Amino acid sequence: MEKTEKREVLLKGIPIMPGICIGQAQVLNPSIKTPVTRKISESQVAIEEKRFLKAIEKLKKELQEIRGDLDERLSDLINSQIMILEDPHFREGVSQRIKQRMESAESAVYRILNDISRELGEKGSGYMQERSQELLQLARELITTMQRERNHETTFRKDSILFAEDLSIQDTIKAVKSGVRAIALTGGGKTSHHAIILRNFGIPAVFGMRADLNEIEDGTTVILDGAKGIVIINPKKATLERYQAERARYEEFTKELFEHKEERPITVDGREFTVLINIDFPEELGILKGLGRHGIGLFRTEILYFTGKVDLESQRKIYEKIAEEIYPCPFVIRAFDLGGDKVFQFKEKNPFLGVRGIRVLLRNKKLFSEQIKAVILANKKGNIKFMIPMVSVVEEVLETKELLHQVFGEMKDSEPGVQLPDFGIMIETPSSALIADRIAPHVDFFSIGTNDLTQYTLAVDRRNPEMSYLFDHLHPSVLKLIKDIVEVSHKHNVWVGVCGELAADPYGVPFLVGMEVDELSVPPASLLETKELIRKISVEELEELVRKGLEAQTAREVRELAADYLREHYPEVTLFYPF
Ligand code: PEP
Ligand code: MG
């Protein structure tokens, strides 16, 4: 696709958050895969030179850090890269190109290193060929470093449809707060944490889009259909009209949901289910106001850690304010789930299988005790529940429980009126699901985290777009684990909820209701729809669907079973959520 050409192009990706958005693209600097020369103006020369020097220092520092852990042969390799970065001829060459040819720092670096690499390559020997490849690799790393910095400094344009390769969690929040209307990424998976943030804020999104961003012109008109996972560049008039009509239909659908917002989620056969909300930021309480009074089934507290609000007083204030605002509804606070993609202090080869969640907390008792204290202090009205993430063995539950009681014991005389919160765990590893009967006697509740439970059961990275064809929380293996957990919970009188994205998947809700989970906790944008869906179905009828789902061969078969059922009971939802 040529930039200058204005023909309609359809791009496909993974549906992340439904909603149709028509607007202008803002394209964040894609990494340069081909040598594009970007020209600059006189006034930018000094800025580009500074960017180049800053990137050199940053990359040098990163390389020096990596060198620390390596054996002699590999550290020699790193040393040779550092030598190039320090080479005065290289620096001078880039600087001259920026000044004399008015090229951006990225273009100048690429040209200089590419020229040297070609010369080496032409000398022909295997050794020289290898060196030539290393130089090109170094050029790519320098360019990526400069682009990352530039993206970091980017101001997101209000009302734009943002295109990027990937976004950090911080940039996702920044984009949402700047008023970006929709997001299309070439990276990202169905339940990666930035996807969850976008769903919480109701921002239509498509991830894992198969496209080269170098070919999408900034400012061009685009359509993003978050339910179908489609992006259309330069739509024709007829396409625009079709999507405008579809958008109007979707708006009508959501308007009707708002009209029923006060109605309780009671099934056709009279069973009431609790539907709560997941939040990632205290500010989301604002969104909740428009949805009526609801409890919170999952507060991901990591944001407090990343914004430096970990001291006792900051945490207490935040928890107490939320607990009071939603009282008498429940408020489930999840202990910091650090590690995994929410990088903590360790550099690990496989962080999702490493020091994550409760494993981090039990190694950092000061941090953990402070959070527990803040939770207990905030629990003045008694509606707070506290749970821990990533449990895989009983010992973690026992150790946490002991700490919880110890902290409470130390406080209760000096802080009259404080109450011990209900204590629960997230079930999100296959091991905790399989030994739920051994954990149940020690807890008040379970909350099933289907995002991680799916990731760990199917051994698929939840962030990897290449794996999205395998990542389905409706796979019979995951369903089977959920069914077993629910049975154990009922037997032990332990309340059980689902707070992973499955609870908000219209094809998943009939199974969860049919299995009689006690509670579903969903992103704010899915709340009204989930409640409406529950009002259309009946537990008795679902027994058969659950049985068939558990016997199904594939996730697709499970989805088809749910689709057949929904077409009969709530056809609109199958229109807006195709699969
Ligand atoms: C889950 O794993 O399903 C969950 C709710 O936790 P998170 O998405 O924060 O890992
Ligand atoms: Mg999880």
Image (cartoon, rainbow, N blue to C red):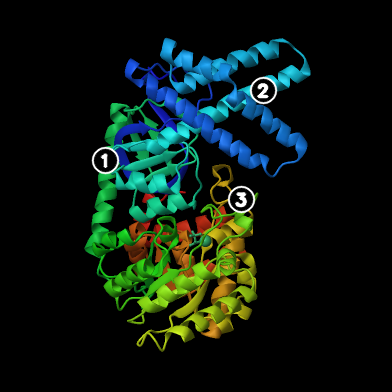
Q: Nearer the viewer, residue 1 or 555?
A: 1
Residue type at mark 3? Lys
Ligand 1 within 8 A of label 2's CB?
A: no
Q: Which residue is mark 1?
A: 245
Are discs 1 and 3 less than 8 Å apart at CB? no
- Real-space CA distance between mark 2 and mark 3, rounded to the nearest whole angstrom: 27 Å
| Spot occupied by residue 443 in the image (x, y as percentages of width and height) | 53, 80
Q: Position of residue 454 (x, y in %)?
A: 57, 58
Vertically, is 348 above or below 50? Answer: below
Q: Is there any visible trace of residue 211 in the rendered image?
A: no
Viewer-proximal residue among 384 and 306: 306
Q: Residue at image x 43%, y 10%?
A: 100
Number of residues whose C-alpha sits closer than 10 Å to that of mark 1, classed few (under 14), some (14–19) or many (20 or more): few
Secondary structure type for disc 1: helix
Amino acid tagged 2: Gln
State the quadrant of the N terminus.
top left
Q: Residues within 10 Å of mark 3 (few under 14, many from 20)?
A: few
- Residue placed farthest to the front in the image? 88
The residue at the point 24 percent across, 58 percent down is 256
* Mark drawn on residue 520: none
Of labels 2 and 3, earlier in sequence is 2
Task: Provide the residue designation for mark 3.
Answer: 347
Mark 1 and mark 3: Cα distance apart in space: 50 Å
Q: Secondary structure at mark 2?
A: helix
Label 2 neighbour load within 10 Å: few <14, some 14-19, many 20+: some
Q: Which mark is residue 133?
A: 2
